[in-house]
């Protein structure tokens, strides 16, 4: 029987590249859907697939129970697995593969897009000229500002390198600290996360979503930050409490919020963050460049093919689950 593969990530589907050829060359049957999918939508689809390349679909225990035993490989396009029940994958013997190390440059660049848009009043000025006007506001330099980076993994490191190039003063916080990198680039380690909050003119979030980081930025922690801080989020929307950041933006306690992620994606029409003038929201496209998409997609396809053939994948979230040959 020809293996059936479900593909839901839209940037994979919409971006040309070698990943399409490599997947087509397998001869497997490919079924596509436009994600990210809700739990209900995912439940409606799964059950008759041997492999699944997913984006940010909601893959719960219920989804996995319906998908098995036929689903043999789950290949995540990207690195964030907070929408996937990893424990259930492991319990059901489903290898969960992912693609670390493919999008850090792109996301770091996007972080500075958000920051510069806020500090230079970019949207105000482009809206003015597009409407036939010539209105001007006075912005701010990045030079000599302190940027606190929460999460010094691949993306956080790239943000720190770019911050140094702007003449900024990066400080980092991470439970797992790369001392060699910090020494090479002159990045001081904050004594605590509260220390980052106190020092940062700009706070940039690059940590995973975990029970500990959910609502990391909320009224209580905003009160510890500098008045007029700008917060940047290219990680996960749930790391920032939506109601609290909206209130802080409206009061001016937080001067700006630049985010590529929200707690609801796509957001409802009356989402509290999408209309505020000091909030810049992009639709989770921080890693959506031709270069990054092709790297991620090719890695996701390679992972899928390797695992389906019983070979070692490039990276696996649950390596304790053995990869067994399907074809």
Image: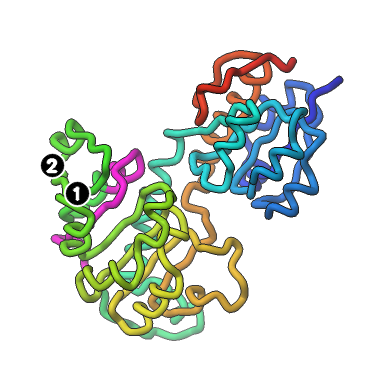
The answer to whether residue 10 is above or below residue 310 is: below
User: Residue 164 shows which numbered tag?
Assistant: 1
How far, Cα to Cα, is label 1 from label 2?
9 Å
Q: On the picture, is 203 further left or further right than 310?
A: left
Q: Nearer the viewer, residue 85 or 187?
A: 85
Identify whether 200 is placed above or below 187: below
- The reply to whether callout 1 and callout 2 are in contact (CB within 8 Å) is yes
SS assignment at label 2: loop
> In the figure, 233 relative to 230: above or below?
above
Does residue 70 appear left or right of residue 287 in this picture?
Answer: right
Q: Secondary structure at mark 1?
A: helix
Which numbered disc, 1 or 2, marks the residue closer to the eye?
A: 2
Task: Determine which residue is flagged by label 2.
Answer: 186
Task: Identify the residue shown where x is 39% and y is 80%.
Answer: 247
Which residue appears farthest toward the front when viewing the image?
91
Total numbered labels: 2
Residue 277 in the figure: left or right of residue 289: left
Please report the residue visible at 23 percent of the width from the left and 51 percent of the height from the top.
Answer: 163
Which residues are drawn in magenta?
141-159
Residue 32, image x and y in percent? 76, 42
Quarter of the rendering occupied by the C terminus: top right
**Which quadrant of the rendered structure holds the N terminus?**
top right
Q: Earlier in the sequence, mark 1 or mark 2?
A: 1
Residue at 15%, 50% in the rendered image? 191
> 291 or 153, which is in the foreground?
153
Residue at x-position 47% and y-position 60%: 237
At which x and y percent is residue 229? Answer: 25, 70
Q: Residues within 10 Å of mark 2 (few under 14, many from 20)?
A: some
In-image side of 130 versus 170 (left or right): right
Residue 149 within the segment the image draws in magenta? yes
- Residue 185 placement: quadrant: top left
Q: Which mark is residue 152?
A: none
């Amino acid at each position: 029987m020809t293996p059936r593969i479900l593909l839901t990530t839209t940037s994979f589907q919409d971006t040309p590249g070698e990943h399409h050829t490599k997947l087509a060359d397998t001869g497997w049957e490919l079924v596509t859907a436009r994600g990210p999918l809700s739990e209900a939508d995912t439940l409606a689809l799964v059950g008759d697939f041997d492999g699944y390349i997913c984006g940010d679909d909601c893959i719960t225990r219920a989804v996995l129970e319906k998908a098995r035993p036929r689903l043999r490989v789950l290949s995540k396009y990207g690195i964030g697995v907070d929408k996937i029940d990893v424990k259930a994958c492991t319990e059901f013997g489903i290898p969960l593969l992912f693609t670390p190390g493919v999008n850090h440059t792109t996301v770091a660049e996007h972080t500075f897009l958000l920051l510069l848009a806020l500090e230079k009043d970019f949207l105000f000025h482009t809206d003015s000229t597009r409407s036939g006007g010539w209105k001007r506001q006075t912005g701010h330099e990045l030079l000599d500002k302190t940027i606190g980076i929460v999460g010094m993994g691949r993306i956080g490191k790239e943000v720190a390198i770019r911050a140094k190039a702007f003449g900024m003063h990066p400080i980092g916080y991470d439970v797992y600290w790369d001392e060699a990198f910090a020494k090479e680039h002159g990045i001081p380690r904050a004594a605590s996360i509260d220390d980052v909050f106190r020092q940062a003119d700009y706070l940039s979030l690059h940590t995973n979503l975990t029970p500990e980081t959910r609502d990391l930025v909320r009224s209580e922690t905003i009160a510890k930050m500098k008045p007029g801080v700008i917060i940047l989020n290219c990680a996960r929307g749930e790391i920032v409490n939506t109601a609290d950041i909206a209130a802080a933006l409206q009061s001016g306690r937080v001067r700006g919020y630049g985010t590529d992620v929200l707690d609801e994606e796509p957001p409802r029409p009356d989402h509290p963050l999408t209309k505020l003038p000091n909030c810049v929201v992009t639709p989770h496209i921080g890693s959506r460049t031709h270069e990054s998409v092709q790297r991620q997609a090719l890695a996701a396809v390679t992972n899928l093919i390797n695992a389906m053939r019983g070979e070692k994948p490039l990276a696996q979230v649950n390596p304790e689950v053995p990869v067994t040959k399907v074809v």
